[in-house]
Image (tube, rainbow, N blue to C red):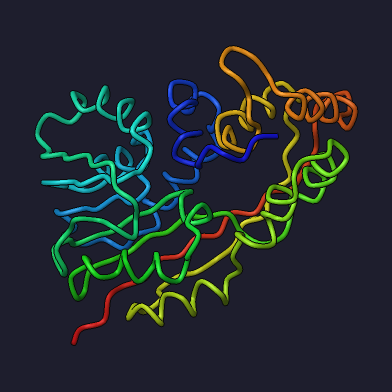
Amino acid sequence: MSSERSAPDGFSESAKDYDAAVRHNIAGSERLVMSLPAGDWSRVLDVGCGTGFSAAAMLRRFPVESLVGVDPAEGMLEVFTEKLAEFPEVDISLRAEDVMEMGVDADSFDAVISAMALHWFPDKPGAIVAMARPLRPGGVMGILTAGSGGEEAWQRVLVAAGAAPEWTGWFDQNHRDVDEIADDLRAAGLEPLDVWMERRRRVTPPDEFMARTRAVAAHLLGNPPGGFSEVDQRIEAGLHAASGPDGFEYDYCKLYAVATKRDG
């Protein structure tokens, strides 16, 4: 398996198929936005904005005047750009930037959201600090990320398929728990308002699960243009072997956090 491509490269490659493959992420983003407190959140920053479904949820709920979306995957931003006509009254700016290098001013946004992106950031505490800096005092932050626990069945498939250690060890390294993210928020000058974990048991057809994997982990599969790598084919076979008559059964944990920036 090739590990030469970065996560942004992989997401750019799968951008056109991304929305169709991640319906659970879209639903989770909508739940995150609905969990934000009422307020005047007219200036919004969406970090790891991807194809824009989290931003769309924000624009549907609040009277947003301007939104900046940042994502290092230019292919994802191209898909987002195709959706801008849906929100003609909102000033939307999209930038191909990494969370640690965002060209945004301090205290310049009323709300910062980040959905299903934090677990891809190498320095998670540092990323939360970077997202807190442009948030004004009294502003609100909402984060949705992969949570600790669950996915044991999926990890067993990866190990049996001979996936590289950077993938099989990814879960313990990148998933966060409630106390961890609450500590990260406080260290960044934020006050947690609501932090919770949701563990869901799902049964998904193996081909649908594999399509989702190719959308969110293309850089780990190492597929050549127009084809599939050996490890991709082994994982696909393993998913079918591990599936029952209703599909592949697995647990997944989503971690939600809502916080406000302290005054002073």
Across and down, in percent, residue 99 comes to: 34, 56
Which residue is at the front of the view, 199 or 107? Answer: 107
* Quarter of the view holding residue 36: bottom left
Q: Is residue 188 left or right of residue 199?
A: left
Query: Quick one: quadrant of the N terminus?
Result: top right
Give the camera-side residue of 192 and 8: 8
Going by the image, does 70 lie left or right of 144? left
Quarter of the image for residue 2 reads top right
| In this rendering, position of residue 82 left or right of residue 91 | right
**Residue 27 location (% of width, % of height):** 49, 40
Q: Going 47% across and 65% down the picture, which residue do you hit?
A: 123
As rendered, which of 11 and 112 lies closer to the eye?
Answer: 11
Q: Is residue 195 above or below residue 150?
A: below
The answer to whether 192 is drawn above or below residue 94 in the figure is below
Locate the C terminus and report the quarter of the image it occupies: bottom left
Residue 134's x, y, as percent? 21, 65
